[in-house]
Amino acid sequence: AGGGVATPAQISGEIDFNTSASSALSAMLRGAPLKIVYFPWDKTIYQIWATRPEIKTLADLKGKAVGIQTRGDTFEIGVRIALKNAGVDPNAVSYTALGFGTARRAALAAKSLPVVVIAPEDVEWLKNNHQLEGAHLIYDMYPEIEMPLAGTAVRSADLEKDRNRVKRFLRAVDKGMIYASTFPEETVEIVAKYAKSKPDSIRATYKDTMITKTKDGSISEALERQETDLRAELIKV
């Protein structure tokens, strides 16, 4: 489930753990009794692709529609940070939510939007299927953009009442990260099966995914503040 579904479900008690830290943080800023306790990544590997030849730099995005997954997600946050770093007002572009799955691939292939934010594995798939002609990369977020990704949120009450259960869950997650770092090919096969994707597509992003992971599941205070300020601005808190 996406963060927009998972976070309300977690607050209501339907699920216990939620790996959409961005959505959880927005809820926390509104007073939700949640805590983010683990951050596996602190950089992003997203790429910004354009389907029109006149769009060559981030400055050319002004007034253009940018395809993302959902409003306020890490795709949008990544674009906002990139634009801000380039001296462009992040609100000078419009953000079009395309949803989960292959919608962003389709938008880039069909050139239905002038700009689309996409992951390298999707780029690899489009190249292999000869659907990337006419599109071009204008900005690679890695390693320029620092931002927390896929953090684990838990209910504050669970930390107080069932702290050992939370610790066991996080220990299992950490073991999974260690396994992924130690056994590349086995990990590629597992993820490809789960994602219903070809191993080559997963293999193309494995290195970047491992490079961007945090050392101990935590992020810096500066990054916490950046993320909190961006989320607060988005939801007008």
Image (spheres, rainbow, N blue to C red):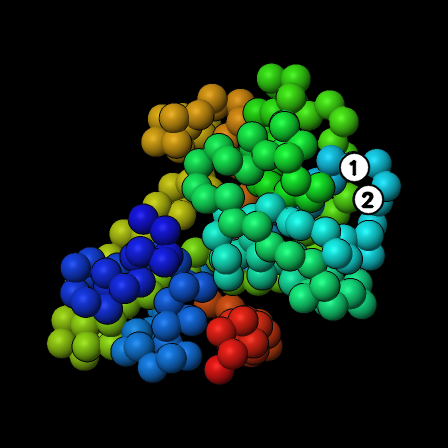
Label 1 Cα neighbours within 10 Å, binned few <14 / some 14-19 / many ≥20: some
Amino acid at pointer 1: Arg
Residue 107 appears in the figure? yes
Residue 78, horizontal then vertical, whole percent: 61, 57
Rendering quarter of residue 234:
bottom right
Q: Please give the label number shown on residue 129.
A: none
Is label 1 in a helix, a strand or a loop? loop
Q: Please give the label number shown on residue 52.
A: 1
| Side of 214 where 109 appears, left or right | right
Residue name at image x 44 percent, y 36 percent: 101
Q: CA distance from mark 1 to mark 2?
A: 6 Å
| Side of 6 where 223 appears, left or right | right
Amino acid at pointer 2: Ile
Residue 228 appears in the figure? no
Residue 111, horizontal then vertical, whole percent: 67, 32
| Side of 163 where 171 appears, left or right | right
Determine whether 210 is above or below 34 in the image: above
Residue name at image x 30 percent, y 57 percent: 6
Q: Please give the label number shown on residue 55.
A: 2
Residue 113, horizontal then vertical, whole percent: 66, 40
Determine whether 208 is above or below 154 in the image: above
Residue name at image x 60 percent, y 41 percent: 118
* Proximity of marks 1 and 2: CB atoms separated by less than 8 Å: yes
